[in-house]
C-alpha cells in the first residue's frame, strides 16, 4: 500500500501537478509535498530526473507550485519537480506559530538537537533521506538523477544540502539564498532554538562556513536581485568571499532592479531549469 | 497630479509589475488594479497595446498576477496586462462579505440598479469606461489597441463587455467562462441582488443571450477544461448553442483532463496572448 495520500491533483502543461500527504518518520508528523510530473513521466516504465525545490520562510509546498511558473519549463525539459513543505506543522510546540523565523514555516533545513524542537524539526534528514527514498519508491523518478535548488531560506537549504552531499546531486543552484545563516538575523533565532547557544554547532548549517571547510566540485549557480531589500540578512558577500577563498566555483548573477519575491524567481526559473536539465541529461 | 497611487512594484521579465490604487467614481470607493508593462513600454514615447484581464469569483488583482505566468509571454509579445479587481470592497453594505457569489469579489461586471448595491456595484462602467480612460491617460498604453480576456466570472465579463462593445476591442477570449449567468447558480443570486427579480433585466448581462441578440464580428476564443467540476454552472453548451444559432464565430477548445483552476489557465495563457497579439499588431 502506498504511503502517499493524494490531497489534490491538477493537469498542468500536459503533465500532472499533485499534492501528497504522508507520515514522516524524520519529523514525526504528517508532512505534505507537491510534485510536478512532466508528460514524459506518463510513458510506461519511464523514469524522469527530478529537481528538488526548497522554499523560503513562511512558505508551504504551494507557493512555488502556483507562483514560479516552473511547470512550463519542466514539462518541456522532461524534469519532475519535488516541492516539500518548509517545516513540520501542528506539532504542538509552544510558540511554534509565534514568529516567522522559528517554528512553523521556518525549519531551516537543520536537524534540531534541542528540546522541544528535536522531536520534530529534522528537515535536513527529511529532505536528504526520507523524502528522496519515498519519491524514488513511489513515483516514476530516476533515483540516479536529481538536482537541488531553492529560494531564500530554501536557497540556504539547497546550497547546504547540495554542498554537504555532492555525490547525491548532479547540480546545485539558488535564488537569493541566506548565505551565512549563523551571521544572519534570519538564521540566528532558529539556530539558537534548534541547536542551542553554542555557535560552533551552527557552522554545520552555515553555507559560507561549509564552503570554506569543504568546497564542492559542482559549480554553484546563484541569482540575486539587485534591489532585494534583505541583502543584510542574505549576506551574498559572505558567499562570494567564501567561494573565492576556497576555490569553490560560483556563477553569481546579480539582477539589477529585481526584488526578493516570486516575480524575480519566475523571471529566472527557466534559466535554472535549463542549467539543471543539462546536468541531469 | 496622478490619480494613481502605487501600492507595490516589482521588476518581472525585464518589465514592471505595478499595483495601483485610485478613487473610482463609477464604484464610489477606492479600487485597485495591477499592470504589467513589458520592456517595450520603457522606450521614450512608446505606447504599447493592452490586454484587459477580468478575474473570477473571490479574486483580487493579485490572483492572475501571481498565478498565471502571463508576464513571460506579455514581455515577449510587447503587450501590457491590465488586471482590475473583481468588485468594490469595504463599502459597508450589509452582507457584502457573507457569500462568495454576491458582493465582495463578485461584481459580475454589471451596473447594479437595486439598493443598496447600485451606489457602488457598477463594474460594467468601471471596466469599460473609467479604468480605460485612466489607463490611457496615465500609462504608456496605446488607446487604439486593446483586447479583453478573463476566467470564469471574468470570462463572462470579458465576453459580455467585448460582445456588447465590439469596436472597443480588437479581440476577445475567455477561459471557462460563465456562459449564461441568468441560468447559472453562480449568476442568479448576484443578478437578483444587483438587478432585482425581473429576469428580463438580467439578459443584458447574460453572454449567451447577448450573442443571440447581437453576435459580434469577432471570432471568440474560448478554452474549457474537460475535467472542470463546475460545468453545470458555466454552461458551455449554452455558449456553443447560442453561437451556432446566431452565426457567432467561436473557436471553442475543450482541454481533456484540465480543471477550473490556474494550473489550467497557466497552461493555455500563452496561446491566448499570442491570439491577442496577432489582433493587436
Image: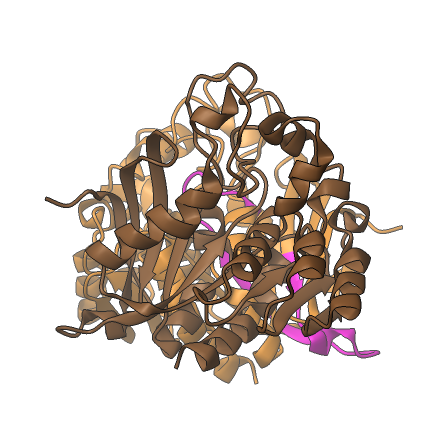
Chain colours: A orange, B brown
In which quadrant will I find the C terminus of chain B? bottom left
Can residue A210 be seen from the camera position used here?
no
* Residue at 23% in and 67% down: A255
Left or right: residue A244 compared with residue B173: left
Q: Nearer the viewer, residue A155 or B68?
A: B68
Q: Is residue A37 in the magenta section?
A: yes
Q: Is residue B114 above or below residue A85?
A: above
Q: Is residue A242 above or below residue B77?
A: above
The picture places residue A217, in percent across and down from the top left corner, at 38, 76
In which quadrant will I find the N terminus of chain B? top left
Can residue B108 be seen from the camera position used here?
yes
Q: Would you identify the image quadrant in which residue B227 lies?
A: bottom right
Left or right: residue A158 compared with residue A225: right
Left or right: residue B36 compared with residue B237: left
* Residue at 59% in and 58% down: B159
* Residue at 21% in and 52% down: A235
The picture places residue B40, in percent across and down from the top left corner, at 26, 75
Instruction: Please provide the residue range marked out in magenta.
Output: A35-61
Q: Is residue A16 above or below residue B188?
A: below
Q: Nearer the viewer, residue B82 or A156?
A: B82
Q: Is residue B139 above or below residue A7?
A: below
The picture places residue A34, in percent across and down from the top left corner, at 63, 53
Q: Would you identify the image quadrant in which residue A160 lies?
A: bottom left
Q: Nearer the viewer, residue B150 or A166?
A: B150
* Residue at 62% in and 46% down: B204
Residue furthest toward the top? B94
Q: Is residue A129 in the magenta section?
A: no
Amino acid at each position: 500500500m502506498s504511503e502517499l495520500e493524494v490531497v489534490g491533483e491538477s493537469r498542468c502543461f500536459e503533465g500532472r501537478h499533485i499534492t501528497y500527504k504522508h507520515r514522516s518518520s524524520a519529523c514525526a508528523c504528517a508532512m505534505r509535498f507537491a510534485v510536478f510530473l512532466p508528460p514524459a513521466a506518463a510513458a510506461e516504465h519511464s523514469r524522469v530526473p527530478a529537481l528538488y525545490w526548497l522554499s523560503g520562510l513562511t512558505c508551504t509546498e504551494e507557493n512555488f507550485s502556483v507562483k514560479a511558473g516552473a511547470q512550463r519549463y519542466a514539462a518541456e525539459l522532461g524534469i519532475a519537480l519535488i516541492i516539500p513543505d518548509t517545516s513540520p506543522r501542528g506539532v504542538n510546540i509552544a510558540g511554534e506559530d509565534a514568529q516567522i523565523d522559528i517554528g512553523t514555516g521556518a525549519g531551516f533545513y537543520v536537524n534540531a538537537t534541542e528540546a522541544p524542537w528535536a522531536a520534530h524539526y529534522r528537515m535536513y534528514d527529511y529532505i536528504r533521506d526520507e523524502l528522496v527514498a519515498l519519491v524514488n519508491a513511489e513515483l516514476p523518478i530516476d533515483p540516479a538523477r536529481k538536482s537541488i535548488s531553492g529560494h531564500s531560506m530554501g536557497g540556504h537549504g539547497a546550497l547546504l544540502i547540495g554542498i554537504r552531499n555532492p555525490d547525491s546531486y548532479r547540480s546545485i543552484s539558488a535564488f537569493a539564498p541566506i548565505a551565512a545563516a549563523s551571521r544572519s538575523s534570519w538564521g540566528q533565532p532558529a539556530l539558537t532554538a534548534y541547536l542551542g547557544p553554542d555557535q560552533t554547532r551552527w557552522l554545520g548549517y552555515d553555507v559560507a562556513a561549509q564552503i570554506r571547510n569543504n568546497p564542492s566540485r559542482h559549480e554553484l549557480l546563484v541569482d540575486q536581485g539587485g534591489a532585494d531589500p534583505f541583502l543584510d540578512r542574505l549576506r551574498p558577500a559572505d558567499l562570494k568571499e567564501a567561494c573565492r577563498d576556497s576555490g569553490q566555483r560560483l556563477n553569481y548573477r546579480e539582477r539589477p532592479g529585481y526584488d526578493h519575491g516570486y516575480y524575480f524567481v519566475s523571471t529566472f526559473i527557466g534559466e535554472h531549469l535549463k542549467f539543471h536539465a543539462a546536468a541531469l541529461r
